[in-house]
């Protein structure tokens, strides 16, 4: 039996939630003030996941980078291997908001998508707005 | 870019970050015609485009967005609105009569008249000079926000072995960002006995990567020849003074400073507007109006918010007020109400209540405040000048790092009230 204090991050309240259980089952969850806290603590105990926000190299763009994120949370322990895969990629400008940059990032089934647009260099020079 | 600018506007907004963007669009929705948005950078969105992390928008949009995505929600609406944007433009001066002097390379120096002015200049970071860290004047000492712009917008890593001073949100976010990009973060130092950042950031930026948070510690010396080579870290006592003998040397090449934000109020001061020494922002009434009629302020130039969602909310309060001011729909209260920060409260915004509410759909007034110390099992209370408790609410924990709000029903504000005092105390045991 494992006991873990998990700080809920669902809202600024930051409830300290105590979870008891083992890898497969949860015995008890205490200290949360809303259903979201219960759900968060359960997930964080069984399978912690994170959205990964980072940047990807852009060629021919008004900016050298485009900001990206995983469309859904990925397992926390895949973050560094995901960063390695992302470092191998360069995208051509223009990049659209929401454009898929990498499908199935490190075998998670989750896509990496652009969180902004990056115009091509020429368009930027013509005075279009970022 | 539309170049047909006029020299007279109903509303001129200074700054196109989240506060200015939100206010421009909300003011237009409330019927304000003729809005000019002035921005000194070459893009809109203020700091949001470089805040690539997620965690924005949960409160306002009900979904989790990154900074650039949050900015896009507003920027994308500008072209189809009547709001005019003049970017790469620096405002040099605003007179109390609302004449604005601005400068850019297309129009040169120009004078713009406004019926209403909204100050939305945001804030900037405190620097090494502001906190006077002794030692060598080396390269490699930069604010966390500067490092963030280098990494996320311009595309290079400003250091390999890093120490972060300050555990506010920007410090925590940058500790993670530097780690993800391959730098080694030795630790995050915090002079106070608690982190001033959001819980979420402490968990996801430090705990996830085993980056130590050293509470009650500060940097007492920076050493190096051309570049930072090492720093001295000291423990501090209860008076926040370094404890002799506690010094430790840490080898590093970069120092990131996340030691606070200062509302950027040079223009406000030039106008002669009174500032609150605690918030660093203007003293305002519930309309977010400064002591000059028709000059409003919102966002981080008024009070440093910890969530951009609250900035948007405040921009809408200010936009609504601007529209009421321009259409002369406001009615002054017989007596002003002064809002006072009481026990364990550092500040309350607004600072006073000047007007009687006319709108029937507006039944409450939201007070924004911060506690001076963490209080568990907290009771937030508003008491009037006759000692009458108007409203109280309970919270499991209240910390200086997280802005609190109290929703005050307007029906409680009778015309004789002249002062309200807000306090936070530990709730008494057994009380309901």
Image (cartoon, coloured by chain):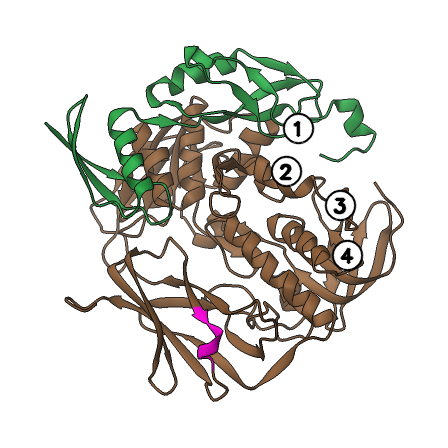
Chain colours: A green, B brown
Q: Which chain carries label 1?
A: A
| In the image: residue B126, left or right of residue A125 | left
Cα separation, mark 2 vs mark 1, equals: 9 Å
Cα separation, mark 3 vs mark 4, equals: 14 Å
Point 45% across, 42% down: residue: B170
For this rendering, which residue is in front, B346 or B55? B55
Q: Which comes before the other along the chain, label 3 or label 4?
A: 4
The residue wearing badge 1 is: A117
Callout 2 and callout 1 share a chain: no
Q: Residue A29's spot in the image, x, y percent?
A: 19, 38
Q: How crowded is mark 2: few (under 14 residues within 10 Å), some or many (20 or more)?
A: many
Q: How crowded is mark 4: few (under 14 residues within 10 Å), some or many (20 or more)?
A: many
Callout 3 and callout 1 share a chain: no
Cα separation, mark 4 vs mark 2, equals: 20 Å
The residue wearing badge 2 is: B72
**Which numbered disc, 2 or 3, marks the residue closer to the eye?**
2
The quadrant where residue B344 appears: bottom left
Q: Which comes before the other along the chain, label 2 or label 3?
A: 2
Point 80% across, 53% down: residue: B103
A53 in relation to B371, above or below? above
B330 in relation to B157, above or below? below
């Amino acid at each position: 039996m494992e006991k873990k204090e998990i700080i809920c991050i669902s809202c600024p309240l930051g409830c300290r939630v105590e979870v008891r259980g083992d890898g497969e089952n949860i015995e008890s969850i205490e200290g949360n003030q809303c259903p979201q806290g219960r759900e968060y603590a359960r997930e964080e105990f069984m399978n912690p996941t994170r959205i990964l926000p980072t940047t990807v190299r852009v060629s021919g763009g008004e900016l050298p980078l485009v900001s990206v994120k995983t469309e859904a949370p990925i397992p926390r322990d895949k973050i560094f291997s995901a960063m390695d895969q992302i470092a191998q990629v360069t995208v051509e400008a223009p990049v659209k908001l929401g454009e898929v940059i990498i499908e199935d990032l490190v075998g998670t089934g989750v896509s990496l998508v652009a969180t902004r647009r990056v115009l091509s260099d020429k368009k930027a020079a013509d005075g279009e707005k970022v | 870019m539309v170049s047909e600018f006029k020299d007279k506007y109903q509303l001129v907004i200074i700054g196109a970050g989240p506060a200015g963007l939100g206010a421009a669009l909300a003011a237009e929705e409330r019927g304000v015609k003729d809005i000019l948005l002035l921005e000194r950078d070459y893009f809109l969105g203020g700091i949001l485009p470089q805040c690539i992390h997620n965690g924005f928008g949960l409160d306002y949009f009900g979904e989790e967005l990154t900074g650039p995505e949050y900015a896009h929600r507003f920027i994308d609406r500008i072209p189809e609105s009547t709001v005019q944007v003049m970017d790469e433009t620096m405002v040099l001066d605003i007179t109390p009569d609302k004449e604005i002097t601005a400068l850019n390379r297309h129009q040169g120096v120009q004078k713009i008249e406004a019926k209403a002015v909204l100050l939305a200049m945001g804030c900037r970071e405190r620097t090494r000079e502001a906190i006077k860290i002794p030692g060598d004047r080396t390269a490699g000492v930069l604010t966390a926000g500067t490092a963030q712009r280098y990494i996320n917008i311009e595309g290079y890593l400003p250091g390999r072995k890093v120490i972060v001073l300050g555990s506010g949100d920007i410090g925590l976010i940058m500790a993670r960002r530097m780690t993800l990009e391959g730098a080694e973060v030795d630790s995050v130092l915090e002079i106070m006995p608690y982190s001033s950042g959001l819980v979420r950031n402490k968990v996801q930026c430090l705990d996830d990567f085993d980056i130590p948070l050293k509470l009650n510690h500060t940097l007492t010396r920076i050493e190096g020849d051309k570049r930072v080579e090492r720093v001295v870290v000291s423990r501090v006592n209860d008076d926040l003074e370094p404890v002799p003998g506690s010094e430790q040397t840490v080898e590093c090449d970069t120092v990131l400073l996340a030691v606070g934000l200062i509302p950027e109020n040079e223009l406000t001061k030039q106008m002669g507007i009174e500032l609150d020494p605690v918030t660093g922002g203007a003293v305002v009434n519930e309309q977010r109006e400064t002591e000059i009629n028709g000059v409003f302020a919102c966002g981080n130039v008024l009070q440093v918010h910890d969530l951009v969602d609250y900035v948007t909310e405040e921009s809408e309060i200010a936009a609504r007020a601007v529209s009421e001011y321009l259409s002369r729909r406001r009615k002054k209260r017989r007596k002003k109400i002064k809002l006072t920060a009481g026990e364990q409260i550092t500040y309350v915004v607004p600072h006073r209540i000047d007007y009687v509410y006319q709108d029937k759909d507006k039944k409450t007034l939201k007070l924004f405040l911060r506690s001076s110390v963490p209080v568990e099992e907290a009771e937030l209370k508003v008491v009037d000048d006759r000692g009458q408790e108007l409203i109280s609410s309970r919270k499991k924990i209240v910390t200086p790092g997280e802005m609190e709000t109290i929703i005050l029903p307007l029906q409680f504000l009778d015309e004789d009230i002249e002062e309200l005092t807000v306090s936070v105390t530990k709730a008494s045991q057994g009380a309901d």
